[in-house]
């Protein structure tokens, strides 16, 4: 394996690789410093997420609630008696308030983009499909081929009787 | 057994020495026909059909040497073959090198493929195992010179049995040769001999699985099973079977050009990340187990493919290249990847997972 691990890093960190692929990754990590650093970083990030409870800062909640959109929504929900506190805002007319709103929108958009980009980067490879139920190495396929083609293989058997049921007239029989 | 191995080695070295361009060892006789074969039912085809029939209806026994060359490596075997009409053949491996060997018995059902892919002609007379023989050649249509030769059969004058068969690649090299070094043939009135007492440990082979006709194949195709009627190098589908194994279904598709055969075993699901065989890159990662009958295994399109063949290397390689490789979906799209990443973060945040 000469290239870097790429998407396989996340699958490796999450223990989703099959034995053979995992061994290949381990071999690669012994000599690839950048990939080792990436694995370490991802492991630390995962540990941080596990260790720290997800708490939304009060300040962030307050700021979100103070935005114009929330104000408009709350205008329909709150007691009419308290309505003067939440004045409807007209979009596009607001001077400094309009700039502030644009800034918040841009920051929110950037956060969403970063989140989506982060999700994309740690998505890892598509999950493997189911494994074939019959092991080709021990399925007797060579024997089946020999009977069908009239060329009898002797990998598994020392002595073989070739049944005449494999003759053309015998085809179609189970 | 050691003497047999020595004999085997000598036979193999002989085969190696003759594995260059095939030299003419056949004396042109009065029976030689001009190329191309005269009509679809040529004299050569009649001789081969008689040989296939004789192999089934006569009582015979003999020692056969099989030599096959794969990736430049020879594989040898010495077989003791006995045949009784109505009971089939008993084959005992006296010595072998490589993973699998096979005696060559002319199959009547494949003669039509042989006649449709090659020009057949009686090339002359020869001798094998002390028997006088007529030599029938299979030549590649539209070609001339030594490279046109694709196969050669030595047919016993007296009994009609095939004494020797060579398969020649398009470089003029013999890639597979099977020849009787001794042969005893009973009369047509011989009472069939029971071999069960002589070979008490013998296993009896029957064709397994369910034969599939055209309509059943079409149903399988509609269900998503990959069924090719042809593969490169003129390999045509001549038999299809479904093996109902305990763990899952396996579809067997067998192909031939009349000289060589190839079987594909297809099953749903991908190959485990490692399997037996030597890893090679042929259109993707494949695992090769060489021998007189070669096995190639790989994953492609969400299925596991196992190719088993006695065909020349070039035929096997072109067949492997023509079939799917890699995962079923190379790229599952940005939306799916984003969702997978978010799910992964969610799993990391979940303290109970």
Image (tube, rainbow, N blue to C red):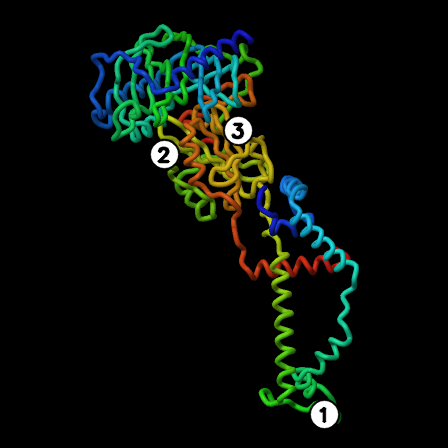
Marks 3 and 1 belong to one chain: no
Secondary structure under tag 3 reads strand
**Residue A22 visible in rendering:** no
Tell me if B191 is positioned left or right of B267 in this view: left
Q: Chain of mark 3?
A: B
The residue carrying mark 3 is: B289
| B333 and A57: which is toward the camera | A57
User: Alpha-carbon distance for marks 3 and 1?
Assistant: 81 Å
Secondary structure under tag 1 reads helix
| A26 and B256: which is toward the camera | A26
- The image quarter in which residue A87 lies: bottom right
User: Alpha-carbon distance for marks 1 and 2?
Assistant: 84 Å
Where A134 falls versus A54 (above or below)? above
Q: Which mark is residue A83?
A: 1
- The image quarter in which residue B346 lies: bottom right
N-terminal of the pair, mark 3 or mark 2, is 2
Where A72 falls versus B275 (above or below)? below
Q: Which mark is residue B233?
A: 2
Q: Are marks 3 and 2 in contact (CB under 8 Å)?
A: no
| B133 and A40: which is toward the camera | A40
């Amino acid at each position: 394996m000469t290239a870097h691990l790429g998407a396989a890093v996340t699958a490796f960190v999450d223990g989703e690789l099959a034995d053979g692929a995992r061994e290949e990754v381990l071999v690669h990590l012994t000599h690839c410093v950048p990939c080792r650093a990436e694995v370490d970083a991802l492991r630390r990030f995962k540990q941080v997420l596990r260790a720290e409870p997800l708490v939304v800062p009060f300040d962030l909640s307050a700021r979100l609630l103070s935005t114009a959109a929330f104000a408009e929504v709350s205008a329909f929900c709150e007691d009419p008696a308290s309505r003067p506190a939440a004045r409807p805002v007209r979009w596009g007319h607001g001077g400094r308030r309009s700039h502030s709103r644009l800034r918040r929108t841009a920051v929110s958009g950037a956060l969403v983009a970063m989140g989506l980009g982060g999700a994309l980067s740690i998505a890892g490879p598509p999950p493997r499909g189911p494994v074939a139920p019959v092991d080709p190495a021990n399925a007797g396929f060579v024997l089946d081929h020999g009977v069908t083609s009239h060329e009898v293989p002797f990998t598994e058997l020392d002595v073989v009787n070739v049944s005449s049921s494999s003759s053309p007239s015998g085809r179609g029989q189970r | 057994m050691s003497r047999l191995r020595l004999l085997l080695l000598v036979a193999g070295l002989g085969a190696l020495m003759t594995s260059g361009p095939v030299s003419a060892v056949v004396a042109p006789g009065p029976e030689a026909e001009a190329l191309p074969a005269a009509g679809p039912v040529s004299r050569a085809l009649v001789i081969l059909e008689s040989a296939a029939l004789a192999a089934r209806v006569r009582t015979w026994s003999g020692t056969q040497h099989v030599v096959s060359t794969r990736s430049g490596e020879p594989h040898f075997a010495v077989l003791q073959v006995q045949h009784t009409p109505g009971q089939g053949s008993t084959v005992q491996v006296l010595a072998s090198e490589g993973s699998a060997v096979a005696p060559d018995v002319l199959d009547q059902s494949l003669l039509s493929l042989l006649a449709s892919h090659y020009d057949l002609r009686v090339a002359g007379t020869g001798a094998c195992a002390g028997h006088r023989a007529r030599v029938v050649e299979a030549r590649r249509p539209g070609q001339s010179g030594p490279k046109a030769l694709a196969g050669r059969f030595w047919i016993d004058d007296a009994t009609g049995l095939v004494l020797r068969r060579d398969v020649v690649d398009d470089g003029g090299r013999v890639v597979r040769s099977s020849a009787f070094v001794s042969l005893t043939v009973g009369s047509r009135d011989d009472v069939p001999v029971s071999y069960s007492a002589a070979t008490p440990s013998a296993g009896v082979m029957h064709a397994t699985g369910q034969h599939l006709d055209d309509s059943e194949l079409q149903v399988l195709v509609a269900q998503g099973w990959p069924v090719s009627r042809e593969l490169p190098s003129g390999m045509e589908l001549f038999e299809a079977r479904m093996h109902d194994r305990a763990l899952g279904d396996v579809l067997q598709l067998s192909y031939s050009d009349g000289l060589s055969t190839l079987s594909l075993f297809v099953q749903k699901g991908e190959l485990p990340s490692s399997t037996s065989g030597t890893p090679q890159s042929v259109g993707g990662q494949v695992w090769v187990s060489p021998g007189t009958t070669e096995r190639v295994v790989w994953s492609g399109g969400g299925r596991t493919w196992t190719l088993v063949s006695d065909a020349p290397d070039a035929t096997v390689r072109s067949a492997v290249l023509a079939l799917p490789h890699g995962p079923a979906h190379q790229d599952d799209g940005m939306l799916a990847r984003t969702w997978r990443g978010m799910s992964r973060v969610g799993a990391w945040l979940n303290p109970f997972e």
